[in-house]
Amino acid sequence: MAGRSKTTLNSTQFLARRNWDAPPGITIFAGKASFFKKQLIERFINELSKEAAPDVNRLRGPPNDKRLRELPLAEILDSLRSMSFLASTQVIIIEGADAFLRAHRDELAACLDSGFPGGHLVLCLDNKLDGRTKFGKEAMKKGWVVECEQPYDRPPPWENRAPAWDSPLSHWLSKHAGTKGLKLDPRMAFALHQRAGTDLEILDEELEKMKTYLGETGGDRIEEETIRSITGELREDSIFSVVDLFLEGRRGDAVDAVENLFDRGYHGSNGNLVIDPPGIALPLLASLLNKLRSLRRAHAMKQAGATPMNLVQEGVVGKPFLDRFQRQLEKNPPGRLAQIFDRLYRTDLGIKTGRDPRRLLLLLVAE
């Protein structure tokens, strides 16, 4: 593998490489997908262990700059500059290192050239590395910067004609199943993450269950029946799917999605299955309210001369979702937004005063 990168590296491609060169002094794993970071750290340590097991020290970065004294830079650098008496090399891993890096970019930039005689520093960032800074530019040339981004569970918004299953997550899941000796078509992968959610660790666990389940019968191909037998019901962000379908004017699909939610429930962020009607309806209304406010703000900005990219720059919408957001703006001019706000508040009041949540939600999305 090339020893140094002039840009960021993709985590799945990085993991797929058979041989790693000696790691640089500083390695950065950046992004929201903690599953990829765990895989990378394990592989990183295994590569170093081919000669002798390294001394591994895991630290947790402070949540903000005010607590940086809890991770003293001088002690960390002194340790890395000193040879370990107990191991051939050492690895210091700092998780949640965003604030730590912001505070010590200049000092760490000086280490990119020299490296550390005693080991390696691994910084796990919750967000992307800022490539505009001097450290970011130098790290991409002299260190390893590996993107650990969550694969999208839908086709890119600009691919209007792509089928729903043709997403980065479906393709990743299909390939990941192959590493376990399983055959999973991208269409079936879509069916799996529709039911089990987008959390990569949970999806990995579901694949392990299916491997055991199919192993008892001597099979290796995952079909819809297997998915239904092993996985739970619908995922939490099916709520957001209802909101998007409704605001895009796809009433029939939105009605079907609401029916599915109330028939099957969904798994919340804590992993528990939510099946009580108010517990389904109220979070959906809250999500819709937030989206309506974003659309209303976008209309006001456009009237003042804002461009689509201004909406991204101001944080109204993420760039990958801009095309979908613009379609929703077209479908929902200010007058219609005002009507939806009014219906939403009446629906919320009806649910909180004891009326049937399912009926009220169906009426809301069907109008």
Image: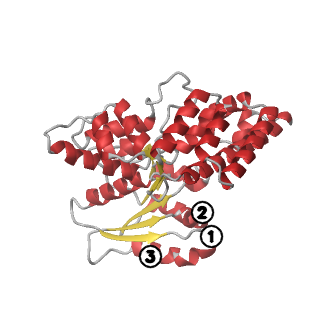
- Is 252 on the left or on the right of 95, as rendered? right
The residue that disc 1 covers is 65
The picture places residue 186, in percent across and down from the top left corner, at 36, 31
Lower sequence index among marks 2 and 3? 3
Q: Residue at x 61, y 47 (%)?
A: 356
Badge nearest the viewer, 1 or 3: 1
Q: Where's residue 361, x and y in %?
A: 62, 41
1 and 3 marks in contact (CB < 8 Å): no
Q: Mark 2 points at which residue?
A: 102
| Mark 2 neighbour class, 10 Å CA radius: few under 14, some 14 to 19, many 20 or more | some
Check residue 234 in the rendering and tell me which mark sits there, or answer none: none
Residue 155, horizontal then vertical, whole percent: 50, 31
Mark 1 belongs to which amino acid?
A: Asp
Q: Is 18 on the left-hand or right-hand side of 186?
A: left
Choose between 192 and 23: the one closer to the eye: 192
Residue 138 falls left or right of residue 203 = right
User: Residue placed at 78% from the left, 37% from the top?
Assistant: 339
Q: Which of 333 and 349 is in front in this view?
A: 349
What numbered label is drawn on residue 78?
3
Q: Quadrant of the C terminus?
A: top right
Residue type indicated by callout 3: Asp
Indicate how the structure is coloured in the image.
secondary structure
CB under 8 Å between callouts 2 and 1? yes
Q: Which of marks 2 and 1 is nearer the N terminus?
A: 1
Q: In which quarter of the image is residue 264?
A: top left
For the residues labelled 2 and 3, the Cα–Cα distance comes to 20 Å
Considering only order in the chain, which callout, 3 or 1, is on the residue closer to the N terminus?
A: 1
Cα–Cα span, label 2 and label 1: 8 Å
- Closest to the camera, between mark 2 and mark 1, is 1
